[in-house]
Image: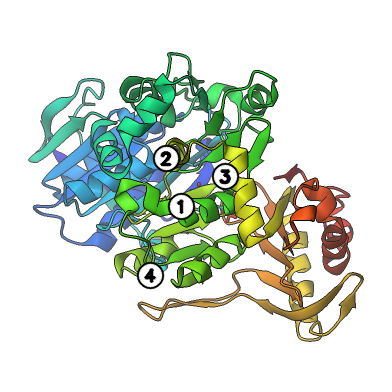
Amino acid sequence: MSINTVSTTSFPGQRPGTSGLRKKVSVFQQAHYLENFVQSVFDTLGDCAGKTLVLGGDGRFHNRAAVQTILRMAAAHGFAKVLVGQGGILSTPAVSCVIRKHGALGGIVLSASHNPGGPDGDFGIKYNIANGGPAPESVTEAIYQRTEAITQYRISDAADIDLQKAGATRIEAMDVEVIDSVADYAELMQKLFDFDAIRKLIAGGFRLCFDGMHAVSGPYAKAILEGQLGAPAGSVINAVPLEDFGGHHPDPNPVNAAQLIAIMAADDAPDFGAASDGDGDRNMILGRKFDVTPSDSLAVLAAHATLAPGYRAGLKGIARSMPTSQAADRVAQALGIPAFETPTGWKFFGNLLDAGKATLCGEESYGTGSDHIREKDGLWAVLFWLNLLAATGKSVEALVSEHWARFGRNYYSRHDYEGVDTHAANELMASLRIKLATMAGQDLGHYVVDFADDFSYTDPVDGSVAQQQGVRIVMTNGSRIVFRLSGTGTEGATLRVYLERYEADPEFHHLPTQQALYPLILIAEQVAGIADWTGRAHPTVTT
Ligand code: G16
């Protein structure tokens, strides 16, 4: 074995987006592309002697090859040890959990999350810091600057290691430990939730269906839901991770999880349905013939949190991303705890969690989590719901309907226009920004504009500022329209339009969502000139 220094030249555009660097697999397969980015991460970290790195991914195409490359580079950079998931598999929440439990310097997650996989699909890489969470923008920006200047990287010429067998081996002077992908994570879940109560619920005939979407959470769900909690075999569907996710889009929303939606819509549907995404950090929650929006899920979990053993002491605060509905704010107000509004991106929750300002966090993009780790956590949300259902004996629909009756309902929907011409999308946003200054007080049919701005966030812990985080038009009655461009797509631009209407009167709590939001949808299309700029009469995906 020897360590070689390889000359390289920089690639343009290796700037991490909302959640790491995401590109087509073919881009990552170019010679030196992955190596340049990894060396830039290591250079940004500096001396790693004596330090431990955690490494794993969601099992998508190119995962194993990338793991072997990164191991050889970590050895060349002088890491003392790497903990790598068996088969190269670790869900994003599991990486966060393992970093924290083992006091690692950080971790590398190989995933493009909910984006499709396979040779023609997407690949991604993300660095997480010692608190287990995504690197903040100061770090990702330093990594990017390094990718622009890189001229060489260092790599061992050691042979591939056997990722299938748990146990210890060495590359150069570095210890490599192949760890059980599920064990540390499952141990943490047992501390947070009342497994006995959930076991009893299931033994009593309560039926559930979890859709692993042929992505990373299948093995975790099998081990915990079927193995530890006694759900009958087959309760977890699409449980085997596949390199191309079976050709599907591993994105847990009513459009992409169509099989689960059909199961939950049947007359003999299970009591509870859920799905997770490519890397296991997202969740979708369903009741029998009933779906729960991610924003409502956060609010319901917050309102009942003390029923779960890990949250008995109560919540310190609740944080949500700006486009997420304001339902959770109402719970925070009732509990007398602070509510935080951050830009889109889980990394913005890290400081609030570290500082003990927030306990629960959530995003409209099917992400929910807490201070137990520093990533959103799909299976954690599922277990939290199961704990609440076991503790209250109520159905999903009853819990949500009662919540609306108490707090009012925030009707909510997101309209995505995918694969839009990037220039046109930027022009649309620019033209919206020009209108902002004159919008306050404008009469828009059923609504009067209270204020309109481009969301800017000052982190209450370190004072860092993030600007241009989404154009919002807020009506005098609290209803809102938000426009922003996605930071996770790999083809053209994706325009996201977020629509929210608050309804206090229980008599109007059971309208079809798109109908309830129709006047706002029309305003959004007109104000932004969506059809003119994008050439699209309708969104690609409505959730
Ligand atoms: C990532 C981020 C989330 C964000 C989501 C969508 O999730 O971690 O915070 O809400 O992308 O971002 P955008 O609207 O910019 O596409 P994931 O699950 O893809 O890592």
> Upstream in the sequence, badge 1 or badge 4?
4
Looking at the picture, tell me which residue is in the foreground, 512 or 278.
512
Q: Spatial distance from mark 2 to mark 1, Cα to Cα?
A: 10 Å
Choose top left, top right, bottom left or bottom right for residue 188: top left
Tell me the kind of residue under disc 1. His
Specify the label residue 94 is tagged with. Answer: none
Query: Residue 385's x, y, as percent?
Result: 47, 40
> Upstream in the sequence, badge 3 or badge 1?
1
**Answer yes or no: do the residues labelled 2 and 1 have beta carbons within 8 Å?**
yes
Give the class, few, some or many, for how many residues have Cα within 10 Å of label 1's Cα (few <14, many ≥20). Answer: many
> Upstream in the sequence, badge 4 or badge 3?
4
Q: Spatial distance from mark 3 to mark 1, Cα to Cα?
A: 10 Å
| Label 1 sits on residue | 304
Left or right, residue 77 beside residue 144? left
Which quadrant would the N terminus be assigned to in this image?
A: top left
Q: Is label 2 within 8 A of ligand 1 (CB to nearest ligand atom)?
A: no
> Upstream in the sequence, badge 3 or badge 2?
2
Specify the label residue 391 is tagged with. Answer: 2
Q: Residue at x 68, y 50 (%)?
A: 492
**Element under disc 3:** helix
Res. 20 in view: no
Number of marks: 4
Looking at the picture, tell me which residue is in the foreground, 143 or 380.
380
| Label 4 sits on residue | 138
Name the image colouring.
Answer: rainbow
Q: Residue at x 32, y 38 (%)?
A: 194
| Label 3 sits on residue | 399
Q: Spatial distance from mark 4 to mark 3, Cα to Cα?
A: 41 Å
> Upstream in the sequence, badge 4 or badge 2?
4
Give the class, few, some or many, for how many residues have Cα within 10 Å of label 2's Cα (few <14, many ≥20). Answer: some
Residue at the front extreme, as displayed: 393
Where 522 falls versus 30 (above or below)? below
